[in-house]
Image: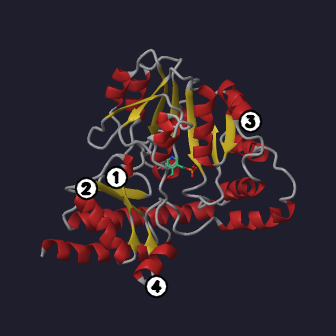
Amino acid sequence: MALVPPYIESLRPYEAGRSIEEVQREFGLRQVAKLASNENPLGPSPLALKAISHVLAKINIYPNGGLDLRRVLAREFDLKVENVITGNGSEGIMSNIIRTFLCDEDEVLTTDAAFIGFQVLAKSRGVRYRTVPYRDWHYDLEALAREVNERTKIIYLANPNNPTGTIFTKHEFDEFYRHVPERVLIILDEAYFEYAQDNPRYPDSMHYRYDNVITLRTFSKIYGLAGVRIGYGFAHEELIANLLKVKLPFEPSTLAQAAGIAALADKEFQHRSLELNARGIKFLSASLREMGFVVVPSEANFIMIPLASEEQAARMTRDLMAQGVIVRPLKNWGLPGCIRISTGTDDDNRRAIAAVQKLTVVTQS
Ligand SMILES: Cc1ncc(COP(=O)(O)O)c(C=O)c1O
């Protein structure tokens, strides 16, 4: 269609995972474990639920653009409010970054098979999008540094990375950073920061603030708020001031802001979520390795399994779904032979392993 630019025409829309209800209907199942979207299997933070119910009666009033939450985050992380932004999920902020800073001739640089939300947003801007391959399922920061040219404007790094679950260290980042000119903006996506922060090898980017780095975090994972859309970011005040010009004036919503403020204070829920996840990662990784699968070591709330072929990944996804376990095939991300499994409740995780055990028997016979 002549109206549609070629870079939009060639995009594939983001495909959300199948819902529990759809899979229940299609396969006639009562119990379904959705382990496809890295959500919190404990549900939302109870304090966030309470806060949402308190502000429900005020939703006739426009929200204040995230100012209340920005103030709370500034206090929590010992920053000025001018260094903090909030948005409709961290993807909402990513979208604003792309609109604010990219010009037509600029280039975006990242890894192959980067987080698909970022891929879609960057490609929809119509600028050149370049990638380098993973090295052993980790970002190849040396190769990325070599690829920086005079047109590079944004470098996107997720730490921990989705879909591999791997991290890079502060030393690796510092080495990389030495090669990045100040005119390049680095997006450090820390959507899974809370799961990795106790690992001494994991660098919390709050401890290495640079003027051309913007850190993004989210309430969608450990806080259990993926459905209300609330995320936040930290950066130099000039970057934030320009993002504030571009963002939708009333983003985030009243409900999302109230939920975020309450969830941030819900330390008990965060603690329970972390414990459950740590058990899940250990159990899923060990059980799958025992069955002979390769499991990429994960610092997040999911694991990635490289399989022998695209056909095998598609078959495993289909056969697990038929048994009531929804996992994420990574073909659309650019990894056709891989699947990703999020941690669930202890019951979900046991159901997933039991389902894989049945598969292996079928596959081997
Ligand atoms: C690396 C990464 N960044 C960002 C997001 C999106 O977060 P939000 O729900 O805050 O938009 C996700 C969600 O899966 C993710 O994996």
Q: Which disc is residue 81 wearing? A: 3
Check contact, mark 1 vs mark 3: CB within 8 A. no
Q: Mark 2 packing: few (<14 Cα in 10 Å), some, or many (20+)?
A: some
Residue 79 can be seen in this image:
no
Question: In what element is the residue under mark 4?
Answer: loop
Q: Foreground: 88 or 68?
A: 88
Amino acid type, residue under disc 1 in the picture: Lys
Specify the farthest residue to the front.
Answer: 2
Label 3: state its secondary structure. Answer: helix
Q: Which residue is mark 1?
A: 331
Q: Earlier in the sequence, mark 2 or mark 4?
A: 4
Residue 156 visible at all: yes
Q: Is residue 63 left or right of residue 298?
A: right
Question: Where is 311 relative to 117, above or below?
Answer: below
Pair 4/3: label in front: 4
Which percent across, then down, holds residue 118?
49, 41
Give left or right: position of 183 versus 338. right
Residue in the image at 73% along x and 41% along y: 248
**Alpha carbons under labels 1 and 4: distance apart:** 28 Å
Q: Are marks 2 and 1 in contact (CB under 8 Å)?
A: yes
Q: Which residue is mark 2?
A: 310
